Image (cartoon, rainbow, N blue to C red):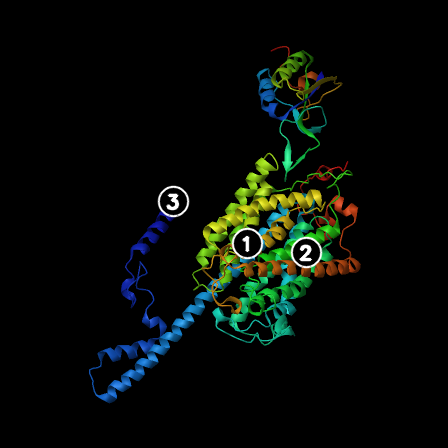
Amino acid sequence: MKKIEAIIRTSKFEDVKSELKKIGIDFFSYWEASGIGNEHTQEYHTYRGTIYDTQYIPRLFISIVLKDINVKKAIDCIEKAAHTGEVGDGMIFTYNIEESVRISNGARGEASTAGPGDNI
Amino acid sequence: MTRKLLTIFFSLILTICFMDLAAQISRTPDPNGGNTGSLADIDTTTAKVLDSLTRSKDTTVAAVNASVNKLATAVSTFANADGHNKISINFVWLLIGGFLVFFMQAGFALVETGLTRAKNVAHTMAMNLFVYPAGALGFFISGFAIMFGGLGALGTLGGFDGLNHEVSVRLFGHSFGLLGAKGFFMNGIYDVGVLGFFVFQVVFMDATATIPTGAMAERWKFASFAISGVLIGGFIYPIYGNWVWGGGWLSQLGVNFGLGHGHLDFAGSSVVHLSGGVLAFLGAKMLGPRIGKYNRNGTVNAIPGHNIPMAVLGSLVLAFGWFGFNSGSTLAGTDLRLAVVAFNTLIASCGGAVAATLWIWFVRGNKPDVSMMVNGLLAGLVAITAPCAFVSPAGGLIIGLLAGVLVVEVTFFVERKLKIDDPVGAVAVHGANGLWGVLALGLFADGTYGDGLNGVKGNVRGLFYGDGGQFVAEAIGGLVNIIWFALAGWIMFKLLDKLVGNRVPAEVELYGLDLHETGLDGYSGIRMDKNAETPLSR
């Protein structure tokens, strides 16, 4: 079992979500994240003639726990869907997971995680 | 079941709609309104008398004499009724104007709160609410008496002349009215005309008292503000108001020194707006800028308002109320010049909004800044407030366009050169354009209106139409306004600072004034990133 965490552009969320669904990964968590980075803002904020910096860059942070066999597929999928080529497209990380329990039916391990199993 | 019941219900309504009930009433219905209102609505007895006179066939001298007498009585009855009608129309117009101006309080609240931060929303709103009762109380106690105690007869409102005590001094052989002294606590002036006039005037005073709350927002202690509201309404505002509108010495400049019609201000560019602007300027200067507004090297940080839709809605509410503010100031619904006033009000506000938007878009910035659009609309309105009754349509547009440019330039000047932090642009909108408004009257008044104003014969002419004296009177009025409000305001703010303190502590300002000053969060249950709202000074 692995966990994938990815920081992506908010504007790419719908693409990433639908691409993941195509490869069978249809549930995961996400939340809004703020960051500081090297991105050059294309649109400046101005207020009463003064240009200002909002001091943070809004992104989405998604977290997926999945079976080992799905990890590479998922990473490729997110990388492709979230790509624009500009600075600030985001990052993808993977981690090992020791245990996973689905609370509703008590399933343990890989059976409880997102994505198709090896029998499919 | 339900369907059946509904069918019965609607058929019942349809039946009632088409039932002929006319047979049961004595008068035929009047669907187009042409026959509603007749002789009988003025006086039934006289109508019957007139009817009998037309039927009378008796031609003896005695009978004809009797008829003539009856006719004379009838004519005087109708003339009285007509006079009552005219004054009633004036009353309705005055009160509608007053109600519209009252609604401007909502506009001020929305604009000021929209252009400030979410963490101060309850405090800013509360100031805009509380200034109304606090100021009105001051106006009731002493304000109205000081301002209008020596006004004389209320010509368009029935002619009650109980407001007859003006304290004045004699200098150089001329009389100078200083302040009124009749009607403290509304004593001895229990008259429909006076009370209607009070309703109209009290909301003007509230506009003056609410302008500083915008410039001093997000750091002004509520206690200090509340006392200032009473002082402005009861004392500071009415004294200058008396000089211009209550028969005081600025209005006498024409009679005494031949300067046009004296200082004229139709609806309050100087009396209401320049006053508020000066107090706002002084208050913002004495409080100092909000934390984070300026960097150590003096450059400016933007502190964006938290709710632009609120500010836009507020500016439209203000523009709507302004029709009452200006047109209502004829104090007479039978003075049809009010249409010109309404037109000028409209065209100047449009000119102001367009000019300010274009100026911030292409000259001073790179985007059509929404807050500047709001300020531009209001700037045009402030500027046309004094001259609205005296200028031509084209004059109105020019005044508005210049007001729009002026508001942007003065905003930049106040913020960047003077380093005075005015969150909503009150100084630029009300101060600068209030002054521009009275000066514009002295320039653009076109000699079509104003015969007999302030006791001077002839229509009002500005410098461009041949009367330089009018311009001088306007300039003197503006200058005196600045001196008086700067002096009185300085004393008031110093006194309040000693008494209760003017500015909240830094930690309160950083957290937001809502909790510490008013005991609750204005947006309860909504998470706010308070650090992101205060720019970091560099």
Residue B116 placement: quadrant: top right
Give whichever of discs 3 and 2 has the lower sequence position. Answer: 3
| Distance between mark 2 and mark 1 Cα atoms | 22 Å
Question: Disc 2 vs disc 1: which is toward the camera?
Answer: 1
Task: Identify residue type, mark 2.
Answer: Leu
The subunit letter for the residue under badge 1 reads: B
Give whichever of discs 2 and 1 has the lower sequence position. Answer: 2
Question: In the structure shown, which secondary structural element does the residue marked by tag 2 occupy?
Answer: helix
| Distance between mark 1 and mark 3 Cα atoms | 68 Å
The subunit letter for the residue under badge 3 reads: B
| Distance between mark 3 and mark 2 Cα atoms | 66 Å
The image quadrant where one finds the C terminus of chain B is top right
Q: Are marks 2 and 1 on the same chain?
A: yes
Q: In the image, is residue B118 above or below residue A61?
A: below
Which residue is rendered at x = 51% and y = 66% of the image?
Answer: B453
Q: List x then y, in percent, for residue A112.
A: 67, 20
The image quadrant where one finds the N terminus of chain B is top left
Look at mark 3 in the image and give the residue it sits on: B3
Q: Tell me, for residue B440, which label it has, or none.
A: 1
Q: Are marks 1 and 3 on the same chain?
A: yes
The subunit letter for the residue under badge 2 reads: B
Question: In the structure shown, which secondary structural element does the residue marked by tag 1 occupy?
Answer: helix
Look at mark 2 in the image and give the residue it sits on: B279
